[in-house]
Amino acid sequence: MKFTCNQDTFSKYLNIVSRVVTSKPGLPILSNVMFETENGKLTMKTTDLELSISTWIGADIQEDGKITAPAKQLSEFVNSIPEEKVDIEIVKQNFNISTSNNTASFNTMPSEDFPNIPEVGKKKYDFRVKKIDIVQAVNRVAFAAASDDIKPVLTGVKVEVEDDKVSFVATDGYRLSKQSVKIEKDSGKKSFLVPVRAFSELTYIISELDTDEEWVNIYLLEDRNQVLFRLSDVDLVSRLIDGEYPEYKQIIPTGFETKCVIKREDFLNSLKVVNIIARSVLGNKMILNINTKDGKIALSAVQSDLGKNQSIFNGDIKGNDIKIAFSAKLLSDILNHLDSEDLVFQCTDPVKPGVFLIEGEEDFVHLVMPMML
């Protein structure tokens, strides 16, 4: 194998594929990136057996071949050299890389030992979503998934396709976030459960790629229980999570007794004040007291060994007065993940979920379970 490419392109794509490489894998080959040259293209692949990334870049190929080399160290070396032509040649199973003033040689492992990564070639996608919509949906939803593996199904984002929409849903049992967006292809009904980490990597790839391509093509590899996301010249493959996802639709309230139109910044500022006490309370508990007549929303927290505090802000309130308890952390989380200043908060009674909506949007909903008063 022998090829030449530009440092800036090589570095950018090497950084993308290297992110799924673990520092201490069970199999040594998983520390490596696989290189393959064919038809004037350089292909790079990495995997940790849960996530896999493949990408291809243009290169001046002098000699075809396949080999694997240490991903992290190679990436660090390429990142540290100037933007200029980079020459790579495999000599006696060493990955030799050089520029005008820098050289390095890395030990290799044979490509035959590298795990097989699914490819879709020129197969038609199952459906596709605009990349800007995926980034927004992931930001609004993924944080609500569980962070531990006690219930593996709760560590993923449920993707539900129906007609011309796809919904992204996440819950950890204490809160639930759902965002729906339009898709280009009406592909009937389907649903699958994707690890949050896969969506985190996908949004990173979207942020890094300077491309005019506005769509992410999505392929379901049902025979392998995997999903493939393609953006431009990068493929991200993720395993799917097995298991029965909770029947969440029945807990989404269809009506309300109290509705508040509020400014996100006002709510956040009050939460910061109240959290000075609430963070010392079991479960970050705070009380939300809505006064319809005065148009005031009061947040308060009490800790017997520490003290108490309160913060009040205004809202456009309709319906009944209500007093309800929530975790200050859960409320802060949702407010910090929304990009709209005008929000709607709805509730029915102190034992039913509080609901956050975005004023003027119908495709987003977030539920927060209350705490005992």
Image: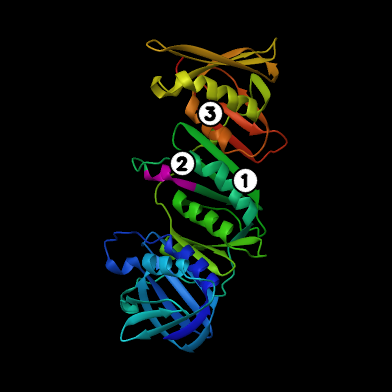
Q: Which mark is residue 180?
A: 1
Q: Is residue 312 visible?
A: yes
Dot placed on the residue nearer the N-terminal end, 3 or 1: 1
Task: Name the mark nearer the viewer: 2 or 1.
Answer: 2
Which residue position holds label 2?
A: 145
Q: How many residues crowd around disc 1 within 10 Å: few (fewer than 14), some, or many (20 or more)?
A: many
Q: Viewer-proximal residue, 170 or 189? A: 170
Which of the two labelled residues, at mark 2 and mark 1, occupies the earlier sequence position?
2
Compared with residue 147, is residue 34 higher up or lower down, i.e. above or below? below
Give the crowd class for mark 3: few <14, some 14-19, many >=20 residues within 10 Å.
some
Considering the numbered disc 2 on the image, is that residue within a helix, a strand or a loop? Answer: loop
Give the residue at the far front of this rendering: 101
Q: Is residue 228 above or below residue 372?
A: below
Q: CA distance from mark 3 to mark 1?
A: 21 Å
Residue type, label 2:
Ala
Span highlighted in magenta in the image: 152-157
User: Which amino acid, by three-letter code, is at mark 3?
Assistant: Leu
Location of residue 21 in the rendering, given as x and y in whole percent from the top left corner: 38, 62
Disc 3, SS: helix
